Image (cartoon, rainbow, N blue to C red):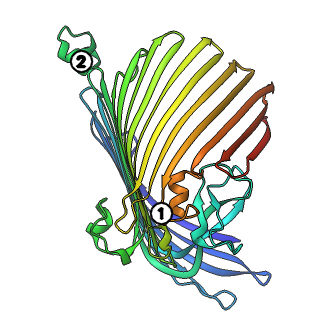
Amino acid sequence: MYYDEMKMYIKSSDTTQITYFVDYSVRNNERNADGELYRDSKSQTTNAGLSARINDNNQINLISTYRYLNNYMVSGIRLPNEETVMGRLDWNSDILQRHIRSELTITTGTGRELKREIAFIPVVTGQGTHVWVDLNSDKIQDLNEFFEKKYDDPNGEFIKTFVPTDEYIKAYTNTFNYRLDASAPRKWASNPQRVKQFFSRFSSFSSWTVNKKITDADLMRRFIPVSNNIEDQNILSIQEAIRSTLFYNRSNPKYGLDLSYLVNDNKQFLVQGFERKQNYELKFGSRVNINSFSSFKMQAGYGLKKNNSDFLANRNYEIQSYKISPEAAYQPKNNLRLTALLGYTNKANVFSESEGETVLIYESGLDVRFNKVSKRTINAVVKYLNIKSDFKSTTLNSPLGYEMLEALQPGNNFTWTFNWQERLANGLQLSFNYEGRKAGENKMIHIGRMQISALF
């Protein structure tokens, strides 16, 4: 390949409080066809940027790009011309002596997007995100037979990919990221007023992320993060994630509390249709270090997992769950720790068209960890899970059954894992991983992996 480029620019001094730049470039591209170089395309690009420190607590950075790409005829094939508009805004601020800090980033772009369809590609066991369950026993891998992996599967694992088609559409991309950290003034901890001492122990972290690709050219719908007012036919993909955690005694070594709220909403439109996954969680956590060799933790939470699809009818469900999982740790030596695990989970399918399927999971286990600094780490976990289920007329071998049973079976289930990492020499490390499970009346499954890593 070959290209030549001409560029002109205007730029301010780096020492001023407000800096800016503008540049314009023309680039001619050539590529090989039938053994000779041919003029392939010509691009014209304009960039502009501005950076301003409003005061000691606020700084704004802005950059935008416009590019027009003219494609020529090569070997009888000519791609359509492309027009791309991109922009990015960063705003960092802090107030109250940096006790409240916020970061805002907004990016936008306009360009062409290939329509995509789902495909599952096989990978090595342990590296996949999905497994295949032959629901109808026809040995054909249908799209509705792939599930998110709960455990490693020796029968094969897959990754979910989106394969591009040969059809282009104009798309508008927008990304919104906001992060907020807040904590009470540090000097309140030593204040004689008990109210200020109490509030000095609180801190919080929140983040909100939206990634959006749409075909609607309306400016308000393109830039406003809330996506409820966008018609389904104008959505290519939307991913939204909200996380907010309130801490009490976050850095205290004796005890602490936390309350978290999490939202994940993913909507994808493909050639086959659309699929939407929503996950809502409310969690409460507590920890207490009773003394130097024993501690107690507890997690309690409420969750709601929704799945909707117009081309995979058996993927429509809405699972409501309640879970509590206490654990007690005992550390008789610095290099040895024993942890007793307990858990109770109550799940119910509350989808409007469901039959009210329910699952109860009782869990107990033991976690043993041995560590020799800079030499080896050994970790073993054994769990027993007793599952009681009522699926009405719904079969266990279904997407709903797989999700509610967490890839296990009603009755008695056992899972175990063993991990061993050994440092052989400087830069040379050996790791061995073994895991197994016995789900109900199914056969026992064993999976082992070994890996040697060398760092030069």
Q: Amino acid at mark 2?
A: Phe
Q: Which residue is mark 2?
A: 198
Tags 1 and 2 in contact by the CB under 8 Å rule? no
Q: Is residue 262 left or right of residue 374?
A: left
N-term mark: 1 or 2:
1
Label ID, residue 118 = none
The residue lying at 29 percent from left, 60 percent from top is 226
Q: Is residue 392 left or right of residue 196?
A: right
x and y percentages locating residue 350 in the rendered image:
36, 59
The Cα atoms of the two marked residues, 1 and 2, are separated by 60 Å
The residue lying at 75 percent from left, 21 percent from top is 375
The answer to whether one can see residue 12 in this image is no
The residue lying at 38 percent from left, 22 percent from top is 256
Label ID, residue 8 = 1
**The N terminus appears in which quarter of the rendering?**
bottom right
| Picture layout, residue 260 above or below residue 268 | above
**The C terminus appears in which quarter of the rendering?**
top right
